Image: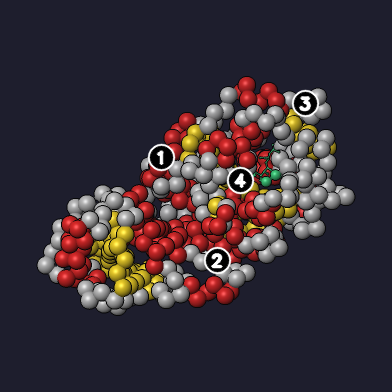
Amino acid sequence: MNFELKTLDLIGAAQDKCDALIVLVTQSFKPGKDALAQLVGEALKAGDLETKPGKMLQLYRSPATVAPRAVLVGAGDGSARQVRLAVQAAVSAVKSGQVRRMTVCFAGAGAEVSGAAVRAAVLAAADASYVYTATKPSAEGRKITRVLLGVPHAAAATLGFEQGVAEVAGTELTKEWANRPANHATPARLADAAKALGKLPRVKCEVLGPKEVVRLGMGAFMAVAQGSQEPLRFIVLKYEGAAKSLAPVVLVGKGISFDTGGISIKPASEMDEMKFDMCGAASVLGVFRALAELRPALNVVGLIASCENMPDGRAVKPGDVVTSMNGQTIEVLNTDAEGRLVLCDALAYAERFKPRAVIDIATLTGACIVALGSVRSGMFSSDDALAAALLAAGESALDPCWRMPLDDEYAEGLKTNFADVANVAGRAGGAITAAKFLQRFSSRFAWAHLDIAGTAWKGGAAKGATARPVGLLLAYLLGQVEKVAAVPVKSARSVPKKVAKPV
Ligand code: BES
Ligand code: MN
Ligand code: ZN
């Protein structure tokens, strides 16, 4: 999708030759003399339109607009959150095969339009009009090709706009891969997608296969992969935006391309949704896509452990004991608790980068959905500063998380007579015991774990990936730019395009 930013008042918006015009009307709206403004004013007065976010009045071939379709939509106080609601509602209402070019006008939003509100509008327009076509090419005709954002002062909105556009490039890549069925998004194809990112400026990609992973001694990762005909891939992405001496942030994505549960097999209902078990990996790909666009002065490493979890004659069995890369032995009591097995080896691998912080992102537990539903991702961290930064990033990006506990008492159930640790504890506190397992492999760096089981995709009629937590992660990373800028560096490897600050 192409986005454009332009200075546009309501008179200009009324003249715009698009297929659908969306007019955001905030509570500070003041009716002017032109026909469209008068119409908005009258509709508000009559009670046919409200400024409550998402309240709409749809027009067809109105003499007040050149566009054949127009939606007047309440945008509340004009904050990022309420603008997002408004744009979501309006775009969902107008999207059809007829609309290719759309204009979103902030003219009714008062003189001040924050960068955050513009970013939110860009993201919401992209999100609401996203169409999956990889295995459904017939849906191609429903795609919106161009969105024009009309704001009172384009110059003041540029930063928020550019950040939003870069983020959309990332979220669309994340959705694209997360939505693909498991026979189209195999570990090998995910690795190819990562290699394609490696062609972008400042991005490098290296892919390891089964042989290399054996040599590294990633016994836990290999145990999960051994029941599948699809060979595993371990993907290493690097974004190099600052001097080599600057310690990187490492993102670790769970990339189970399909999770049957293995020998501890899952029930049939909704098992198809386990194609989304690589959403953590897909979010890492999306973040790198956006980084290549924004070019912040940072170093970031992305690690993806990708394989299928299948039942087979050679599959790992309940009770099997495997040895992780850092030498800890693990009793696999439940083969469906596979995410932590692939992540523990990736976390051990992360150590070699001497990272500032390591954040793993995983559709890890059904228990996290029970705890937090689909509003907030679960966040666990052994480092208070990192936890605070992730919480704040989630709020500012409207992609929130919630900190969960890591008391040592929660690890009691992971004790076993047959290995250093078991891969499951009891049913109680399942999201936390999973995090306690991962924490054993994260003692050498500041670590956080995001359990996105409830937030990464939607089920039901709107089934599809959400691209969360790409927004949270990007906001966190851009927030680090200012912090690392305070650290003197000898030679910047490449000059950043601009100082990318979160809006
Ligand atoms: N990928 C699942 C977690 C999941 C389940 C995410 C449903 C979203 C929806 C994970 O690999 C898993 O199966 N976890 C088990 C852990 C249990 C065996 C301790 C779970 O949550 O049931
Ligand atoms: Mn599982
Ligand atoms: Zn899983």
Compared across the picture, whether 42 is left or right of 246 comes to left
Find numbered disc 1 in the image and state the secondary structure of the residue it sits on.
helix
Choose the circle earlier in sequence order: 4 or 2: 2
Gap in angstroms between the C-alphas marked 4 and 3: 25 Å
Gap in angstroms between the C-alphas marked 4 and 1: 21 Å
Instruction: Write down the residue under mark 2.
Output: 132
> Residue drawn at (58%, 24%), measured in percent from left and top?
407
- Say if 366 sits above or below 80 in the image: above
Find numbered disc 3 in the image and state the secondary structure of the residue it sits on.
loop
Q: Quadrant of residue 185?
A: bottom right
Gap in angstroms between the C-alphas marked 2 and 3: 45 Å
Find numbered disc 2 in the image and state the secondary structure of the residue it sits on.
loop
- Give the residue type at disc 2: Tyr
Residue 83: x percent and y percent? Answer: 33, 54
Using a 10 Å C-alpha cutoff, classify the residue at mark 3 as few (fewer than 14 neighbours), some (14 to 19) or many (20 or more). Answer: some
Instruction: Write down the residue under mark 4.
Output: 363
**Label 4 beta carbon within 8 A of ligand 1:** yes
Instruction: Write down the residue under mark 1.
Output: 392
